Image: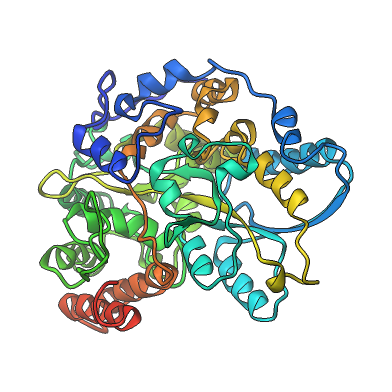
Amino acid sequence: MRKPRLGRALVHGAAVTALAVSTMMSTSVLAQSVDISQWSPEYVRSIAGTEEFDTAAQCGAVTPLDYQGKLTFWYQGVFEGDPDLLRQYYKDFFVAFRETYPNIELQEQALTYNDLLDKFRTALLGNAGPMMVRLQILGGVEFASKGYLQELSPEDVGWKTEDFWPGAMKSVMWEGKTYGIPTNNETMGFIWNADIFERAGLDPEKPPATWDEVVAYSKQIHDTLGIAGYGLVARKNAGNTPYRFMPQLWAYGGGVFDEADPNPTYEEVRLDSPESKQALQASYDMYVRDKSVPVSALTNQQADNQPLFLAGQVAMMVSHPSDYDVMLDLQAKATGADKEKAQTVIDNMRYGLIPTGPDGRRAVVFGGSNIHILKPEYVDGGVVDEAAAKAMTCFWTSPEWSLKMAYAGSNPGNLNGFKTSWMKERLENIEFLDVTTAMLPYGVPFPALPVTPEIMNIIIPDMLQNALTGAMTVDEAAEDAAQKVRDLTGGGGL
């Protein structure tokens, strides 16, 4: 496999900045499974392949392998835009679980990111939920705060809290108690097309260092070549939108609350701050003033930007390392001249760290998913087979499967996954994985509040839409969004 050509934004041989490390570590004690203070592409490579793990033996100590039971399970499945490799690992996972626990009758249901929360909420209102669920990272606190979830910690299924990122554990905590376990965690990187950069008169191996430069580069690309410079995503009620806008908001020094601060309190709403308005203005400038992003940005998800990027119609975007594999899958299905053109784009894909704000602040959403067990009274039939649920929880959060199920687009929730032979294999076979893995210490978890899903999936996209469509000015859109958050939280933050 061709080795990645990294942009100058990522400097090999150096650990992440002290600020990024201290921000990550300030959320909890230093994770003992890995040394966060050394986190760098070189450190990740140095620990890959250093330990072996026996998933069946480890989970058998939690739930005997001959246990007979029944389990209903909902989970966020693969996206339309996910690579075929990830689809295969999902199939392999359920085959492996059934072979390991042949006497557990498993009924699993995969749902899309945008459908899962709504369907789960509806099922809970009718006491018809599954015994367990795997939710996106911003969902757990909402349901824990309403009393739907059982307490569940890594220690309950044979792991240690220190085996998981401190920021990830924040997302399953409510009022000092733990209600779930991280399955995977991820941060994105910045992707650009070096060939487009060169044709537009930009340095092909140097991505924009700041978000202001993203705006300027996007305009230059559009004005020179007549194509979209940046793949803006602003769809309503879609998780893709906050995952791509919040890093921009934080980089400018803004926020919904103070969630990007080292020790957030969530007591002050900042969406109407000058810094937040500056971030929103940057998106306005690209969409309205410069017209340098896709016209379809208001309805696009990342899956819509992927074919545009492959066709050479979008020059820059924020996304996962899995987009490289997605491009390979799409290219394999192309024919004739389109196939050759797609290969040119793939050959010119570059990954770097996400740009900073004017003062050098760099941030990215600390994303991922968590697994939870429901209380019996909210489950269809009124019974939870806890032994079966813990078997599934142990299996998915094991070093082996938390790595494999995140193989192409994320990272293992269980930090021991970084030590496995499968991690070593990933680093060798997945281009640009170094870059997005190196972004992990810059990750900012979404606020650990019950109202966060509504804020991120509704209020933030609505703010963007109000400004970009001209329904409101930038100032009005930011102030409207801030007031909605205050109304939602009772006047202030918490």
Q: Could you tell me which residue is drawn at 66 percent across and 46 percent down?
A: 393
Instruction: Indicate the position of residue 98 as horizontal and vertical percent values.
Output: 83, 42
In front: 140, or 350? 140
Residue 414 in the image: above or below residue 120: above
Residue 30 to residue 290: above or below: above
Q: Position of residue 5 (x, y in %)?
A: 36, 25
What's the residue at 73%, 44% (across, down)? 391
Q: Quadrant of the C terminus?
A: bottom left
- Residue 405, located in which quarter of the rendered image? top right
- Residue 251 place in picture, x, y as percent: 20, 52
- Measured as percent of width and height from the top left, residue 283 is found at 24, 63
Question: Looking at the picture, does residue 240 appear above or below residue 102?
Answer: below
- Residue 312 visible, this orientation: no
Q: In this view, does 412 lie to the left or right of 274?
A: right
Name the residue nearer the viewer: 326 or 482.
Answer: 482
Q: Residue furthest front?
A: 176
Seen from the viewer's position, the closer of residues 360 and 261 is 261
184 lies above or below 48: below
- Image point (14%, 69%), residue name: 273
Q: Give the number of marks.
A: 0
Q: Can residue 175 be seen in the rendering of this structure?
A: yes
| Picture residue at 27% right of the left edge, 35% below the top | 21
Question: In which image quadrant can residue 305 be found?
Answer: bottom left
Q: Tell me if 369 is positioned left or right of 332 in this view.
A: left
In the displayed structure, does residue 56 sit left or right of residue 66? left
Q: In which quarter of the image is residue 235?
A: bottom left
Q: Is residue 35 left or right of residue 250?
A: right
